[in-house]
Amino acid sequence: PEAAALECKPKPRKPSTKKPAASKKAAPKPKAAPLAPPPGWERTWAMIKELRADRTAVVDTMGCERLADPKVSEEDRRYHILVSLMLSSQTKDTVNAAVMATLKAHGLSVSRILDETSEDEFHEMIKPVGFHNVKTKSIRAATQILRDTHGGRVPDTMEDLLALPGVGPKMALLVLRVAFDITAGISVDTHVHRIANQLGWTGGAPTLDKTAFAARDPEKTRKALESWFPRDEWQDVNWMLVGLGQEMQTEKPKLVRKALAASDPGFAVALCGSIGVDVARVVKAEGLEPPDGVVVE
């Protein structure tokens, strides 16, 4: 007789006691807690507004909103604003204004730049600005995106503006404010970054030492300011502090004269000192006479 085939039955498995593996997805980082408003900021802000009331800084006549041609269509005006901002980085306002004048004389619109202006011709017109090679490519690429994606119009959202080559948060916020009257945040350039840290408005103590700034870059400064600065004042922060910073760097005598003539000259003089103005040296060099009771050291 044939041997019966052996039937192999699998052994029953024991239930697993292993715990399911934890997800490797990193937990979202908690948002930084809002800063408390710095002591005395209202008084400082009011004095900054007083010192800037004459609106005679370079930014007041050559800012991006001043460089757009008011006679063109609204679409072209917004395009002028975008282009002027893209040209402005690492470039003096006077140079940027001159280049914008050249572009406007040539004809500055999406169709004119894409259809009737070669890359070499455009590059030659913007050559005086900083990083002109990079800006030639980024402005033309951004202009092409405006045509392909936005019907030739400048978009009115942060997301769409930040998708344009060469446009960062500072530029996008300024475009929204100036072109569309939308205040989506505080635009921070080098002047705003420096002064906000010097005044102790970014979470640290007031200081002139750049290595001791609480916010290490403009984006951190923006987040710090937006966490406590009253929202209804956001639209003024950029041009107020940019103008103050410009005067501090290139027009110290004018700034000191305004401080000595302010409603509270002692406080105004101290404010100038806190952002790096050697008031005593300016007073001596210009032969100025401080008001009674104001000590300049």
Image (cartoon, rainbow, N blue to C red):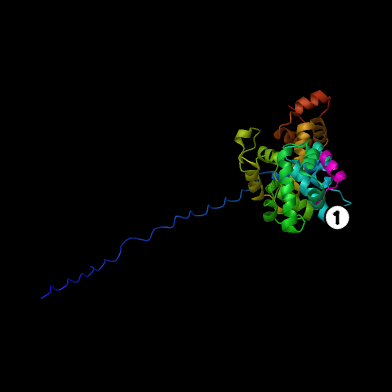
Horizontal relation, residue 141 to residue 210: left or right: right
What range is drawn magenta here?
A: 98-109
Q: Position of residue 158 (x, y in %)?
A: 69, 54
Residue placed furthest toward the right: 71
**Could one spot residue 28 in this view of the protein?**
yes
SS at mark 1?
loop
Q: Residue at x 71, y 45 (%)?
A: 138
Residue 284: name its quadrant.
Answer: top right
Quarter of the image that includes the N terminus: bottom left
Q: Look at the magenta stretch and give its main secondary structure.
A: helix
Q: Position of residue 208 (x, y in %)?
A: 66, 33
Residue 211: name its quadrant.
Answer: top right
Q: Residue at x 83, y 43 (%)?
A: 103
In the rendered image, the vertical position of residue 133 relative to residue 178, given as above or below:
above
Quarter of the image that includes the C terminus: top right
Q: Nearer the viewer, residue 127 or 293?
A: 127
Q: Residue at x 66, y 50 (%)?
A: 226
Residue placed furthest toward the left: 1
Q: Position of residue 192 (x, y in %)?
A: 71, 41
Tell me the amino acid under the disc marked 1: Ser
Q: Nearer the viewer, residue 251 or 84?
A: 84
Q: How many marks?
A: 1
In the rendered image, the vertical position of residue 24 relative to residue 88, given as above or below:
below
Q: Nearer the viewer, residue 209 or 181?
A: 181
Q: Residue at x 76, y 25 (%)?
A: 281
Q: Nearer the viewer, residue 200 or 165?
A: 165
The residue beneath circle 1 is: 73
In the rendered image, the vertical position of residue 276 relative to residue 71, given as above or below:
above
Instruction: Please tell me whether residue 51 belongs to the stretch shown in magenta.
Output: no
